[in-house]
Each structure stands twice: as C-alpha cells, then as structure tokens.
Image (cartoon, rainbow, N blue to C red):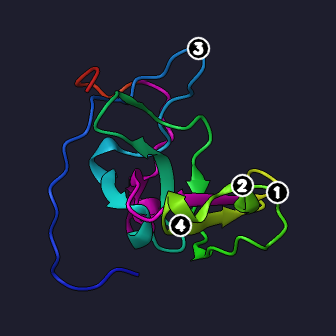
Amino acid sequence: MHTGTEIEFFTVGPLRFTPTEDLPPLPVDEAAVRISRARHISAGDLILAVADPTHAADYFPTPDTARPEPFDPACGCGVCDDIEPADGEHVVLSNGDPWNSCDPWPVDQLALIVPAALRSAAHRTDTQPHPGGRR
C-alpha cells in the first residue's frame, strides 16, 4: 500500500468509458477511477486499463482484482521467464485470474484503477452510459 504525500501529475491519452459491441458498460462510477503506477497498486484495487500517454485507453472487458506480489522470473508460469532483466523492474499484479499465469507489469506502468476502499461505493448496476455522455 502506498503511503505518504507524494503527488504526481500524469498526461494520458483520451479515456473512453462508453460501452461498445466489444466492451460492456464500465462496472463502476467514472468518478472513482484513479491513475496509479503499478508499484502503488494495492490488494483489492480494481484494475480497469493500462494508461498510456501515447494512445487512447479502453478499459478491459473484465477488470482484474489486484493481488500484488513480488516478481519472480523463475516462478514457472510461462510468462515471467519471458521478461528480460533489461526490461526493468516488474511487479505481479495478479496470479491465476483471469489467466493461468502471472500478470507482471513494469513498476512504472500507469494503470486506471478503482482503489479497493472505493469499490463498493463506486459499483454501478445500471447499464446505460453516464448521463453526461462520452468522457
């Protein structure tokens, strides 16, 4: 869990929260979405998408619940051993769900998340886009 008073500002591409044929409605209120570096993602945070300043971000069709653990290139999952030391430091954000392997992320990769503390209050059951339209 990240503690302290460190503040960073990020520039990211446009974020699309409008459902399409391939994406169901976002399961949370857009106001609860935060940008975080992978190293600061905590257990229980809902990972919605990769945030990249070079292109627009679409959220994942099925958001992942974070279960961070240290990166182990020798874990045997078949994914971690493909990451080269030159690729830099990594953290595993989930293991076994939704895939039967680890999900390593570069520690400085930006992600769109809903912090665990906001998940229950942010849960949406409606299937309509936000009344303000596309954001």
Which residue is nearer to you in this view: 135 or 54? 54
User: Disc 4 designates what residue?
Assistant: 90
The answer to whether marks 1 and 3 mark residues whose Cβ atoms lie closer than 8 Å is no
Mark 4 vs mark 1: which is more N-terminal?
1
User: Disc 2 designates what residue?
Assistant: 82
Cα gap from disc 3 to disc 2, whole angstroms? 33 Å
77 vs 123, left or right, is right
Image height of 60 relative to 10, above or below? above
Q: Which label is found at residue 110?
A: none
Amino acid at dot 1: Gly
Amino acid at dot 4: His
Mark 4 vs mark 3: which is more N-terminal?
3
Mark 2 vs mark 4: which is more N-terminal?
2
Cα gap from disc 4 to disc 1, whole angstroms? 15 Å
**Which part of the image, by quadrant, shows the N terminus?**
bottom left
User: Disc 1 designates what residue?
Assistant: 78
Cα gap from disc 4 to disc 3, whole angstroms? 33 Å
Residue 108 occupies quadrant: bottom left
Instruction: Residue 13: give x, y in percent of width and height.
Output: 27, 32
106 vs 68, left or right, is left
| Magenta span of residues | 102-128
Cα gap from disc 2 to disc 4, whole angstroms? 12 Å
Residue at the spot 60% in from the left edge and 53% down from the top edge: 64
User: Disc 3 designates what residue?
Assistant: 21
